[in-house]
Image (tube, rainbow, N blue to C red):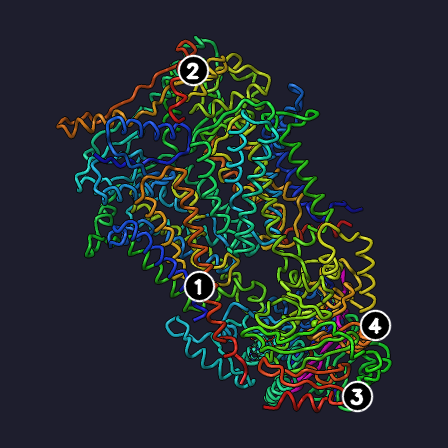
Amino acid sequence: MNQAESEASDLLRIRRLSKTYPGGFRALKTVDFTVRAGEIHALLGENGAGKSTLIKTITGITLRDDGEVWLDGREIHPRNGEEAQAAGIATVYQEVALLPNLSVAQNLFLGRQPTRFGLVREGEMGRRSRQLLQGFGLDIDVSAPLGEFSVAVQHIVAIARAVDLSAKVLILDEPTASLDAREVEVLFTVMRQLKSQGMGIVFVTHFLDQVHAICDRLTVLRNGGLVGERTVAGLPRMELVRMMLGRDLEAVETARSRSHRDTVVDRGAVPAVQAVGLGKHGAVAPFDMILREGEVLGLSGLLGSGRTETARLIFGVDRADQGELRVDGTSVRLLGPRDALRLGFGFCPEERKTEGIVAELSVRENIILALQARAGWLRPLSRKRQDEVADRFIKLLDIRPDDPDKPIGLLSGGNQQKAVLARWLATGPRVLILDEPTRGIDVGAHAEIIRLIRKLCDEGLALLVISSEVEEIVSYADRVTVLRDRHHVAELTGDEVTEQRVLTSIAAT
Amino acid sequence: MSIVLPRKGSAQIGAFILILLINWLVSPQFFDLRLQDGRLFGSLVDVFNRGAPVMLLAMGMVLVIATRGIDLSVGAVMAISGAVAATLADSHSIVICLGAALGVGLLCGLWNGILVAVLRIQPIVATLILMVAGRGIAQLITEGRIVTFTSRDLAWFGGGSLFGVPAPVVLAVVALVVALALVRGTALGLMIEATGANAEASRLAGIDTRLMTVAVYMWCGFCASLAGVIVAADILGADANNAGLWLELDAILAVVIGGPSLFGGRFSLVLAVLGGLIIQAMNTGILLSGYPPELNLVIKATVVLVVLLLQTPRLIAFKDRLFRGTR
Amino acid sequence: MRRHLPVLVTTVVFLLGFLFCAIQYPNIASTRVVMNLFTDNAFLGILAVGMTFVIISGGIDLSVGSVIAFTTVFLALAIGNWGLSPGMAFVLVLGITALFGAAMGAIIHHFEVPPFIVTLAGMFLARGVAFLMSTESLPIDAALYQEVASFSIHLPGGGRLRIIGMMMLLVFLLGGIVLHYTRFGTNVFALGGGRTTTALMGVRVGRITVAIYMLSSLLAGLAGIVFSFYTASGYSLTGVGVELDTIAAVVIGGTLLSGGAGTMFGTFIGIMIQGLIQTYITFDGSLSSWWIKIVTGLLLFLFIVLQQLLTHLARRATTGAGEKDTQARP
Amino acid sequence: MTVGFSQIGSESGWRAAETSVSKTEAEKRGITLKIADAQQKQENQIKAIRSFIAQGVDAIFLAPVVATGWDAVLGEAKDAEIPVILLDRDIETKDPSLYLTAVTSDSVHEGEVAGKWLVDTVAGKACDVVELQGTVGASVATNRKEGFEKGIAGADNVKIIRSQTGEFTRTKGKEVMESFIKAENGGKGICALYAHNDDMALGAIQAIKEAGLKPGTDILVVSIDSVPDIFKAIAEGEANATVELTPNMAGPAFDALIAYKGGTEPPKWLQTESKLYTKDSNPEAQYEARKSLGY
Ligand SMILES: Nc1ncnc2c1ncn2[C@@H]1O[C@H](COP(=O)(O)OP(=O)(O)OP(=O)(O)O)[C@@H](O)[C@H]1O
Ligand SMILES: Nc1ncnc2c1ncn2[C@@H]1O[C@H](COP(=O)(O)OP(=O)(O)OP(=O)(O)O)[C@@H](O)[C@H]1O
Ligand SMILES: [Mg+2]
Ligand SMILES: [Mg+2]
């Protein structure tokens, strides 16, 4: 293809885009980026590489310092969401940018509701909403407030909204982070269909499998700079990883080496935590569960199957209304997370934005928050101690940028996730509950976290991990409990812990 | 060459200085100071002295606002504690009298805190209840009259002085230091900010958000009652009908001038207090100016808007660009 | 059903309260008293409609009481001294107040100043200007005013639905339609749900902010006109503290002060609850100034606690029925 | 007989005294008095009157919070044939038949009495006066200002140099006086203080003292209302004169009402006396007489 020809098929062309955030952080350094009509283009890079920033500067949510954005042969200067939409760019941002207080239907049609005589036609809007969502395999009450649904549902709604805007370019920033395998498949079907209609799609993800499954070309960013653009077909995985990390990933072994297992766990001992008939009306049916020190228990199931609720009961966030919880064999009554914290529990919630980070506070303050809460208000951690703790975990988890005083809300999504993990690791817990710990985390850090989980286990920590990635869960779990419709339906141990077995249990009806 | 100004608070300090300078233009003897009966005397002293109640209220209010709350009842609490102090002043020792007045303030705060944190009533309505009923309670104590007293001990809180500094200013400064020590010397500040910024996340991190909420309302009630004692001591009597009337708006305004958003999170005690001073400097200026009182509100409106526009992000960005240009 | 719970509960609370009052003073359960509830709270109701929009959008408008004062003084002067016809004066004053609100909205949006302060400055300004126009209370003497005052629909039981009462009901009706059934209304909710997000979703946040504050001031102007009908005079001290009453009514009606949720009907009930408390106290008639305040506070407390309690119980009942489960995927 | 009294509220000690005196006066005559407190709001007063009408009282007393805007509701009272008597303040209406009579003091006259006293006292010496006004927009404030200006109109030696609102309260009175003193050369430029009510004067007296001046000597103090505390100040020589506004408006009103029921039409205006008190009028005794009236 010669130069002129390729320019002609370019739908979105970015030239020399630069962005320095207030405070002097250079998030983008003269990045070039091109999306053609009818292609799915992956935008890749480590956490904090500048992917989301690139997207936001294209749509004008954050104003660019320098550079050009061409759409369909015309230079555009959108200054806000409305102008970007009008120009033909539909975007799903990384943090779901929808309104939890509006109904699902209103979210889908905000600003373009069907009206008659100036009045919104609710019925028509509801009908079209249901139709639209059915295309994504979602059958929900569209008149319910969006906030009542899990992030996953919200994400699908956001995607549906963007798709329905029928723009020329569709940008999806980590749409699959909170989806399970089935939903990802649905999304891909829709994407392929849009692609065939000539739409250009930008797709950000940390799942390299997905890149290979659906993308035509890819662009890699590192530290705000452009690393390169490649055609996906024929690009070896190792090569891609090297592009992203700038180094080889020594043994990205998702290999199922569960060799460490039986050596550590003493099955005769009193379990660290034991749930007996624990349950809550309307949340989870009563279940039994055993957590032993040095052992990883995985919770698997579809979205909405009650995994989070299980975790919340054990951590005392919600109060159980039946059954009992035993810690070291003695029955305890948790009146709230504080009680759990005192017992040495830790809990990384799934919904990072609303339940995890405290956006306005600095990274340091976020990391020491639980530690401080356990110490009580009267015993403040000295600044020196705070810095020590923060620095240690920033290094350990490679949180970037490594500035502990930056408000955490300004960090990239993946780095926020790491900081929340750090908060609990800092308390040195004996029982740790992780709800989707690797969500939005890049390949490098992903491997890092899994290594960390194993190490913690070896040190005698009892772990309860919830993950939608079955492959990931079987890679480190000693046992897997499968949930369906808020019931604990199966428990797999030992050699039963295989991807296949887990998937069958999930799917069984 | 760069001008080193603290980023945070430069707008407020600037506004305060600007208003003082304007006052000086309006009234040339504005900065004059002399010692009168062992007490500093002058318009500048008045700004601090008269501003003490609002400064105290702002100190309390800023923490409440940091937890996404609001306390409308501070004016009423001032009236109650003033009434209590004045009724007890001549019959009981100052310790009992003060203890009762401040205790009542804490109690009022506890009530508000429970309504907000335990019964989960929206703060504005929760505190509105005490705003309405509280003034009634104060009037009930005084039976609608102005209860006067002669106790010199109590009078010190209004008219006394320490090393020439008027007692209200001393009290406000002490309260500020105590508050700073409490909030920044312990982990309370962090916990309050976390609660205000994201209550759910803070709860999951093990912070007792309920305790934090109750505590800030109690602190706010305490500050209000101290302000009430000062106001009563100042006129040697408790005027339950008028003490602290509409002062809640001034207190909120002070906090907002001091910077934090009304939607919780980061706060600065010092800037809130500075906000209170800015309001009082403006009021004193109006009084010194000699304009007819019909103009008071129009002047106030103008000043408030100007002070605010001074610290809007747009203007700050503009200013930054200017400074960067000169560097 | 769960979504309408707050309104439902508030209504039930009002009805219970009404029953309680009527048992103590049977006269309260008459059309006369109920119609008086409309007449006496007409201006408050109209203000509350505007305030509902403002609060749902996540803002607040403290200037409304002062705008009423300004409006009444302006009308008295325009009709009495400048010789304008009432109709002209109304159009003029509504124009001025709308512009005033638009200006506040524009400042709030463009300079990103908290609405609390902008409208507080607006509150000072409007009353200040009223003072400058006249510090005296001025009678308004126009034929129209007498006609308005004398016209009413008689109901069985001696009740009279007066024009200003009807105006309030009409404003509530229109306000409800605009809030709940138009794009503008949805945008107001959206703004309350999140400003940045709303902007991300392609809504023109600036325009809507201006429109909201314009509407609120315009309705405050209308409330001023209604107040001038009510008292046939203009006075610069009118409506001191009314903004708090209005905000309270809106919030009691189930609207979240932090924005994003609320209903027009709830606000209506909020106004009625406040009116009922007033009426109860007037009927009692034996309370001293301070007991009035204490009892008002107490009743407010009871209403709100009852509301909270019922909501809690109803929530429990509905979640027990597994409402959440019905939303699960197929 | 049952009388409904729509009282303004309880914004000052004087108002509280008026309420409590009304109660005693009613008791004395065996009349049932229903007091509705309007919390400073005209709309509440209108509601109260409507409810009095609904309850069928024999007469209505009204202490109007503003002068205008009563025609409609008083018309209703008239239709119901309930006589209305105005207390304390007059109203503006074109139809005087809406009320039976008004028992009020003439607040312009009060100011005039104060002004005249000052002119007489300074006897030709130059005298710069500072004025503490009541709440901006309150009719009493406007009238007392007007009356005082009338009182000093003839004397060129007496003039008002500063005038600011003290909102009828002690706290504000003190604060404003402080700034007056500072603005006028430490108070040396001030010859006299005129306050629209005693409470502001009492606050101002403290400010004068704190500035190192002698109230009553260095700065003459004249005010209106005659609340008990001002007599203490007069007795101590810290205040010079006060003009009385009696809290007993209800007494004459009851008398007029009883007479009216007996068939005698009362005059349209029953003016209460605006008596001047100085240190010569035995302030100690005045204090004793007033202290239990509920001020
Ligand atoms: N408003 C801001 N102010 C300052 N720095 C910011 C701001 N927003 C983002 N950054 C910084 O810019 C860098 C790039 O962030 P960005 O969100 O673009 O990363 P990303 O590639 O999307 O990462 P992830 O995969 O974790 O989502 C990060 O280091 C982040 O801390
Ligand atoms: N895909 C979905 N479709 C409809 N409703 C859903 C879906 N996912 C979750 N929900 C609802 O959202 C709420 C939250 O689900 P919850 O977080 O308990 O699920 P989970 O098993 O923890 O799943 P995950 O953690 O993978 O999101 C539940 O009320 C559930 O009914
Ligand atoms: Mg990102
Ligand atoms: Mg979950």
Q: Chain of mark 1?
A: C
At label 4, the amino acid type is: Glu
Name the mark nearer the viewer: 2 or 1: 1
Q: Chain of mark 3?
A: A
Reading the image, the residue beneath label 1 is C6
Q: Position of residue A449 (x, y in %)?
A: 78, 74
Q: Position of residue A470 (x, y in %)?
A: 70, 84
Q: Chain of mark 2?
A: D
Disc 3 secondary structure class: loop
Q: Is residue D160 magenta?
A: no
- Give the residue furthest to the left: D263
Q: Position of residue D274 (x, y in %)?
A: 33, 19
| C-alpha distance separating marks 3 and 2 | 101 Å
User: Which residues are drawn in magenta?
Assistant: A24-48
Reading the image, the residue beneath label 2 is D241
Name the mark nearer the viewer: 3 or 4: 4
Q: Answer yes or no: do the residues labelled 4 and 2 have beta carbons within 8 Å? A: no
| C-alpha distance separating marks 4 and 2 | 89 Å
Main secondary structure found in the magenta portion: strand
Q: Is mark 1 within 8 Å of ligand 2?
A: no
Q: Which mark is residue A459?
A: 4
The answer to whether residue C37 of the structure is visible from this angle is yes
Which residue is at a point 65% across and 86% down the rendered structure image? A490
Name the mark nearer the viewer: 1 or 3: 1
